[in-house]
Image: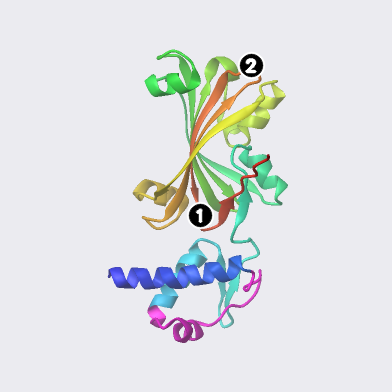
Amino acid sequence: MKSNVAKYQIVKQYILDQIEKRIYQPHQLIESELELTEKLGVSRITVRKALEELVSEKVLSKKKGVGTFVNPLPKYLGFKPGIGFTSEAKNRGLTPSTNLLRLAKVAAEENQATDMQIHVGDPLWLVERIRYANNVAVSYELEYFDYHLVGELTEDICKQSIYEHLKEKGVEYEYVDQRISALLADEASAHHLNVPIGSPLINIKNIAYLKNGKPFNLGFALYQTNSFHLIHTVYR
């Protein structure tokens, strides 16, 4: 079984690499199952499993009687971490959407209080969301906002851009501290991001600060790596 999983992952990665290198172009018909079987030296069942996963992840689409095509959505969607998801998606010509899992007012625990420079027990908004670009699940987010600094939040606000809402109120971030690491998807994150358990994820912790240096937002985000990558520009 382990061998079978490894083989279909190899097929899947081969196809993703072809898309990344632009060998497979958007709307292009890729090789048939038989051609991939012969080229990669695996069984047709293995190829079919890889294709089915890529179809479910919206990287590919199938047309009965014709074959399998590359979707117009590029495999890799470059996102700059630390910038609002909604505005970043729109800037790249993508349609953002949100599945709001939870919105609640909670009391700050010790770790949150330390990161946000507040007292244990101070009120925070907890916002749990899945963010989508062109209906592809891109990130799972768990965020905390300082209630005293951001005021009231509603479900409608949290389904759109919280940062845009805060900007209209005069609450804008000046800079963001980040800690970026990698991990493997567990059952919960795999479910949220529609990826297999054990898939590589990018794990980002953000702390956003106002101009006066006061933190107002602590966020934790998991990004799937099947449909996009992060872009980080470093200036001298």
Compared to residue 178, the image places residue 170 above or below, namely above
Camera-side residue of 116 and 73: 116
Amino acid type of the residue that numbered disc 1 sits on in the rendered structure? Thr
- Front in this rendered view, residue 139 or 177: 177
| Residue plotted at (44% across, 56% down) | 195
User: SS for tag 1?
Assistant: loop
Give above or below for 84 relative to 230: above
Which residue is under mark 2? 212
SS at mark 2?
loop
Front residue (pair 216, 71): 216
Residue 69 falls left or right of residue 200? right
- Distance between mark 1 and mark 2 Cα atoms: 35 Å
Left-right relation of 38 to 69 = left
Name the residue at the left extreme: 1
For disc 1, the neighbor class at 10 Å (few under 14, some 14 to 19, many from 20) is some
Q: Quadrant of the N terminus?
A: bottom left
Q: Find residue 88 and report its image quarter.
A: top right
Residue to which mark 1 is pinned: 225
Instruction: Report the residue at 64% width, 75% height from top.
Output: 28
Indicate the position of residue 167 as horizontal and vertical percent values. Answer: 69, 26
Q: Quadrant of residue 25?
A: bottom right
**Which residue is depicted at the point 57% across and 54% down?**
228
- Do callouts 1 and 2 mark residues in contact (Cβ within 8 Å)? no
* Mark positioned earlier in the residue sequence (1 or 2): 2
Quick check: 65 above or below 80? Answer: below
Q: Nearer the viewer, residue 24 or 177?
A: 177
Query: Whole-percent x and y of residue 40?
Result: 45, 81
Where residue 29 appears, as percent x and y from the top left, is 61, 78
Magenta highlight on residue 91:
no
Mark identifier at residue 101: none
Query: Magenta residues, as a range?
Result: 22-45
Residue type at the position of mark 2: Asn
